[in-house]
Amino acid sequence: MSQGLWISFEGIDGAGKSTHIEALAKTFLQQGREVTQTREPGGTPLAESLRTLMLSTNMDPLTESLIAFAARRDHLKTVIEPALAKGHVVLCDRFTDATFAYQGGGRGVSWELLKQLEQWVQAKDTDPSALSQPDLTVWFDLDPHIAAQRLIQARSPDRFESETLEFFKLVQSAYAKRCQESQGRFLSIDAAKSKHEVWQQLTRGLIAKGWLSIVVPVVNFMAPGQETGA
């Protein structure tokens, strides 16, 4: 059995994570790996119910944070850890870094309080002083102005996507802070590039770690001349 591998994907709304997660899942499958594809908040029936609540109901920022971590605990124990134990590649659209970015940066919840919640929720059963964390976090780094332009063309926005440009600037700054604190875990991607260029950045990073062999593109993102954005 191959060793389990856990990759999370982070970035502000409009950064283009979903397209590349799908393409990467296909690539790992083509290279003989079992893949578990999931998301946060969500990933389990309970966590999906909490996701719906978070995205549709106004609430106190700390309450919002607590709901995110409650969903995360169920997700971690029900989906992520069992998949890793089976040797799967787990591709997770957002994890705890998103809570630090959105609730910590955007909503102003205490950074230290979020770290305490992180320790409680993600402590490993075998070593409570250690955290269950992704092996790699891919951060789709994108200027909030560009993200806002992309979101104009998106589906009807939820309560987070409907936030102001100033909110997303705070979120982006919090992502940068989180990246600085955990540099060894992060792979920063310039998400302002074309989809094909973003894909090349992503796969080069994974090849360098020995997690992918030489990659043949598995998806034609857009027709030539229409590929701006990720």
Image (cartoon, helix red, strand yellow):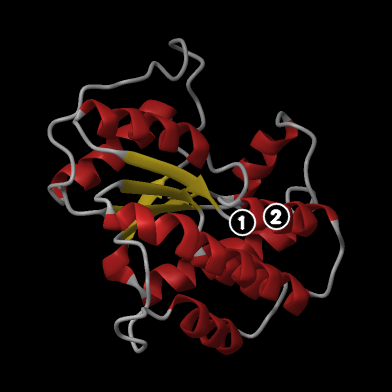
Q: Secondary structure at mark 1?
A: loop
Q: Secondary structure at mark 2?
A: helix
Give the amino acid type for the residue marked by disc 2 in the picture.
Arg
Q: Is residue 212 visible to us here?
A: yes
Q: How many marks?
A: 2
Contact flag, marks 1 and 2 (Cβ < 8 Å): yes
- Identify the image quadrant of residue 67: bottom right
Q: Name the residue carrying label 1.
A: 41
Residue toward you, 114 or 47? 47
Q: Is residue 138 left or right of residue 65?
A: left
Residue 111 in percent (x, y) is at 58, 83
Residue at 36%, 80% in the rendered image:
125
Give the amino acid type for the residue marked by disc 1 in the picture.
Pro
Q: Which mark is residue 51?
A: 2
Q: Is residue 180 left or right of residue 55?
A: left
Residue at 51%, 67% in the rendered image:
96
| Circle 1 crowding by C-alpha within 10 Å: few under 14, some 14–19, many from 20 | many
Of the numbered discs 1 and 2, the one sitting upstream in the chain is 1
Whether 223 is drawn above or below 94: the answer is: above
Q: Is residue 22 left or right of residue 67?
A: left
Residue 131 in percent (x, y) is at 37, 78
Residue 135 in percent (x, y) is at 29, 61
Residue toward you, 209 or 228? 209
